Amino acid sequence: MKKYLIAAVFLVPLVFFSQEDLLNEIDTDSVITPYETAVFKGLKIVNFESTKLVAKDELNFIVSHRFGSIKNGINTFFGLDEAVTRLNFVYGVSDGFNIGVSRSSLLKIYDITFKYRLVRQEKNGFPFTIVGYNAILINTALDKDNMPLLKFKHRLGYTTQLLISRKVNTNLSFELAPTFFHDNYVAVGSQNNSQFALGFGGRHKLGKRWSINADYGLHLNRASNSPFKNPISIGMDLETGGHVFQMHFTNAQPMNTNGFLGQGSGDWADGDIFFGFNLSRRF
């Protein structure tokens, strides 16, 4: 009996400290991820794509509305009478690769998108997340009766983007988005079909579920006689469980990249801006 008591005296502290060491490991190394998370909560900042991707085997359904210009006042109920809609499905083939399909009522555009992570920001290492984004668009609103020489190739457009983000701290994230887009048909005759732009965006958390977001697109080779403007947008994100609700104001009514960068017609200085929202549901 004495031997068992002596063994217990030595073994109990050993077991206790062993458990304490295991708990310390759980609290530190095994829980801490080497990557930054929640850089952005929405798949878009406002107009521009963010570096967020849908997780593997998840399906996101995004309903986007962009109303008419508030400049027309009560005659159009501040634009609510002139809503356009985009329905977008995004599926996570893997955690780092997404495929999307969408349809916009404006110009009746269908698009197929591919979004893929190239590298991820590390907490004590590489300082950026870099994501590629490509889209193929089909403009089905072009009318062959008015354009007798119209062929299917004229309906096509393409987008290539590199999305580079950095989470500066818990509340603040930035993104840079060098963009190339090409439309086989352009509304302004002197506009090059191949166009270049540089996007800037950011997010600042206001609370656990709220943030303020903004983005801007600098078009780099817009035709001198083009009536279109660079898109400037500001909005707020509200996260509610499986939903992300985004409300925003922008001077561009189109919601695909080629549209808001190449054909944004509003002007903030004239009050010619559009209210809109995105509602995202995860399945």
Image (cartoon, rainbow, N blue to C red):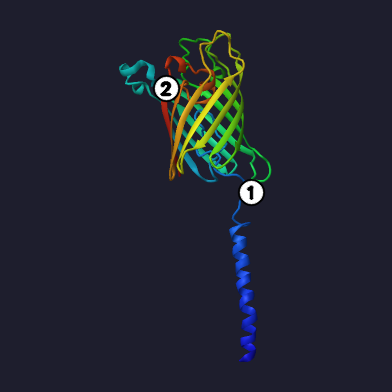
Q: Nearer the viewer, residue 177 or 25?
A: 25
Element type where label 1 sits in the image: loop
Please name the residue shown 62% across and 82% down the image: 9
Q: Is residue 112 visible?
A: yes
Please name the residue shown 49% across and 27% down the image: 110
Using the image, tell me which numbered label, if any, was put on residue 34: 1
Please name the residue shown 38% across and 16% down the image: 71
Q: Earlier in the sequence, mark 1 or mark 2?
A: 1
Q: Nearer the viewer, residue 257 or 90?
A: 257
Crowding at dot 2, Cα within 10 Å, few <14 / some 14-19 / many 20+, comes out as: many
- Give the residue number, with chain letter if any, for mark 2: 274
Element type where label 2 sits in the image: strand
Image coordinates for residue 123, horizontal then vertical, percent: 64, 45
Q: CA distance from mark 1 to mark 2?
A: 40 Å
Looking at the figure, which quarter contains the C terminus? top left
On screen, residue 38 above or below 109? below
Using the image, tell me which numbered label, if any, was put on residue 200: none
Image coordinates for residue 3, horizontal then vertical, percent: 65, 89
On screen, residue 20 above or below 250? below
Q: Nearer the viewer, residue 201 or 223?
A: 201
Q: Amino acid at mark 1?
A: Pro
Instruction: Using residue 107 as the reference point, say whether residue 23 is left or right of it.
Output: right
Q: Quadrant of residue 271?
A: top left
Q: Is residue 267 visible?
A: no
